[in-house]
Image: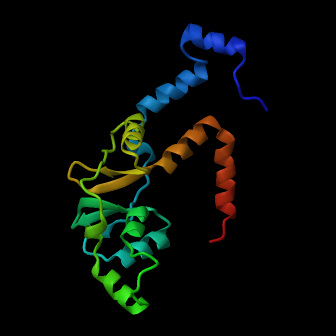
Amino acid sequence: MNLDPTLEEKNEWRETGTPNKANDDLVRWWRMVDVGDIMSSPVICIDRQSTLPEALELMKRHHVRRLPVLDGRNMVGIVTLGDLRGALPSEVTTLNRTELGYLMDQVTVERAMRHPVISVQPDTKLADAARLMLEHRIGGLPVLSAANEVMGLVTESDIFRILIDMLDPESRSTRARQTKQAPT
C-alpha cells in the first residue's frame, strides 16, 4: 500500500498550504486541546524519603515509568525508571546481596530524583506540552495545580494514543474490545 501523496495532492498542498480539510481540523484541534483533557489521573506519587527499592516496587506494581516526588502535598522532584537504574550499583560490584540490600535501603528517592521539574498546568495546550517534551528530551510532564499539587501526568504515550484515535477511529473500538476481553 503506497501512502505517498500523488503529484496532484502535492501541488494542492503547495497552493493551499494544507493537504485537506481533515488536516485543517486536526491542526485546529491540536492547537486548542488542553493537557487537562488527556492527562492521566490520579497519579502514583512517592514521598521524597522513600527508598529506591520502594520506588522500584511502586513502579512495577502500577506499571509506570515515572513518579512525581512529594514533600507533603507539594511536588519537589520526579524520578524515572532510568534514574533508579542509574542509581543502582553495577552488576560487577564486589558487595554480596546482604550488603547491597542494606546499602540500597539507605538511599532515598530524594538523592536520585531530578529537580527542578519541568511541569505544566491543566490549561496548557497539548501542542505546547509536546514541544516542551521534545525540547527537553523527556517522556512525560507532571500537571500541577496553581498550589503546586500534582493533578495528573501527560506522557508521550498519552499523546500517541490520542493522535492514533483521531487519525484512525477504528483503533478506538479495537482497544475497547481488547480492554473488555482482558482478564481481571
Closer to the camera in the image, 94 or 76: 94
Colouring scheme, one of rainbow, by chain, secondary structure, one colour: rainbow
Quick check: 93 above or below 159?
below
Residue that extends furthest to the right in the rendered view of this protein: 1
Quarter placement of the C terminus = bottom right
Q: Is residue 52 above or below residue 145?
A: below
Q: Residue at x 30, y 67 (%)?
A: 112
- Left or right? Give the position of 91 relative to 144: right
Picture coordinates of residue 100 (x, y %)? 38, 85
Seen in the image, is 178 located left or right of residue 82?
right
100 versus 154 height, above or below: below
Residue 80 percent location from the top left of the image: 39, 62
Residue ranking furthest to the top: 15
**Residue at image point 41% right, 90% down:** 96
Q: Residue at left 29%, top 76%?
A: 50
Q: Nearer the viewer, residue 152 or 86?
A: 86
Q: Residue at x 42, y 75 (%)?
A: 90
Residue 33 on image: x %, y %: 43, 35
Residue 83 image point, x, y percent: 38, 64
Quadrant containing the N terminus in the rendered view: top right
How many discs mark residues in the rendered view? 0
